[in-house]
Each structure stands twice: as C-alpha cells, then as structure tokens.
Amino acid sequence: MRGIRRDFTVGDSIVHALDGVDLDVAAGEMIAIMGPSGSGKSTLLNLLGCLDRPTAGSYDLDGEPVSALPTDRLADIRQRKIGFVFQSFHLLARMTALRNVELPMIFAGVGVAERRERAAQALDRVGLAPRAEHRPNQLSGGERQRVAIARAVVMHPAILLADEPTGNLDSESGESVMQLLQRMHSEGLTILVVTHNSDVGGRTERILRMHDGRFVTDGRPTPQS
C-alpha cells in the first residue's frame, strides 16, 4: 500500500479514517495490527480484503494493482486470493462443517467431487475430520472457528485476514486457534491479524500499532516470559 487514504463524510465533516498509510507485507509474514477503537484497524482490514476502495493511494495485492478495479474484478480477487476469519465465525447454521467449508468452491464453480475432497482435506488440516457432518450448533466455539479457518484457506489464498479470531473464545480455545494459525504461518501462509489482545499480538512476527488513521509503531513483539 502507498499513500492510502480513506475519508468518510459524517454530517458536514470529513473523517480521515486512514490518513496516508504506507504498508509492505512480505509473502509468508504473520503480522498483528493493533490500536484503540477508532484508530483505523477495521477500515484498513476492509481495504486489504478488497471489501472497500481507498479515497486515494494505491494497493498491489500479490503483484496485482487492485485499488481501481471494477466491482466484479474485486469480487474475483476476494474469491481467489483472500481468506477471511471473523470473530463471530459467520458459519451457516443449517449446513454441516463440510458444507460450510465447501461454500467458497461452490461460488468458484469447482466440481462436486473435487470440492468434497478439498473440503475434507481442509477439515483434516484443522483437526476436525471427525466432526465433518456436525452443524455449527453441535460444535464448540473453538471448533467453529477452526471450521471458519478451514473455509478461509480451502481456496489457497495469497493472504489470510483474521479479525479478532480469538475474541469470542475462552483462553483454551483461543490458544488452540493461535497454535493453528502459527502452524499455517510456518507452512508459508501470509497472515494479518487485527486484535486488541496483546497475547495474540505477541504470537506474531511483527506488530503494527495504529492511532488516528496512521501507523505509529512497527516492530517485533516483546519476547514473552
């Protein structure tokens, strides 16, 4: 990202949610984005995920300029190159874990046999192969988040964006989710985590702290005792 600005009109005022942000993320990095509410974290995540467009500036994702692409091309980029994990899981209640993981491939037109096989492999990767036919209400919070992670990576994205991935979990479940994300990172996946939790931030390679729409620090986390 270079010179990224995102302005919103609120009444008669213009709010600079992002104010000239520059950001480089190397393939294979695991980064935490931290800061108080209103600092611009969610706006930045929406732009990184091609869910919104900047008011000014440029964004290249995996070598492709995306900031000025038309809506249909942005949807294609999201489908092929970006995985999303949310605090509230966003699983479909009437579908099994396997069917939830299949969803991105259904939208991408992947054939039935291939998507079933890939979904099963993704669930096995997150340790939930025995729970494939369970619906979300039959799973614990940690299991639901692992299903969501399986769904996010089944299309082999260039980058995984996780918004408070442990926010709705108890400490034990949160630990298992962070261990899973760290393992995927060790296998080469690029991961950006938005979090208020300093313990989560400390599990990444690099912490970017935001305030008033800008990065104020960029560095390695302090070693945990």
Image (spheres, helix red, strand yellow):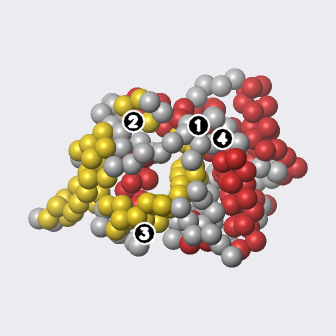
Horizontal arrangement in the rendering, residue 165 relative to residue 124 (left or right): left
Q: Amino acid at mark 4?
A: Gly
x then y, percent, for residue 132: 81, 47
The N terminus - image quarter: top left
* Disc nearer the start of the sequence (2/1): 2
Q: Are marks 4 and 3 in contact (CB under 8 Å)?
A: no
- Would you name the residue on which mark 1 appears? 157
Which residue sits at x=43%, y=60%? Answer: 218
Q: Which residue bears the numbered disc 3?
A: 35
Q: How far is disc 3 from disc 2 in space, using C-alphas? A: 24 Å
- The percent coordinates of residue 16 (x first, y second) are 23, 60
| Comparing labels 1 and 4, the label whose residue is closer to the camera | 4
Mark linked to residue 169: none
Horizontal relation, residue 220 to residue 54: left or right? right
Q: Which mark is on residue 188?
A: 4
> Between marks 2 and 1, how big is the CA–CA gap?
15 Å
Question: Which tag, 3 or 1, sits closer to the chain's start?
Answer: 3
Q: CA distance from mark 2 to mark 4?
A: 20 Å
| Up-down relation of residue 167 to residue 114 (above or below) | below
Q: Residue furthest left?
A: 12
- Mark 2 surroundings within 10 Å by alpha-carbon count, few (fewer than 14), some (14 through 19), many (20 or more): few
Could you give the CA–CA distance between mark 4 and mark 3, rounded to whole angstroms? 26 Å
Query: Of the residues shown, which amino acid type is indicated by label 1?
Result: Pro
> Which residue sits at x=26%, y=43%?
57
* Amino acid of disc 2: Asp
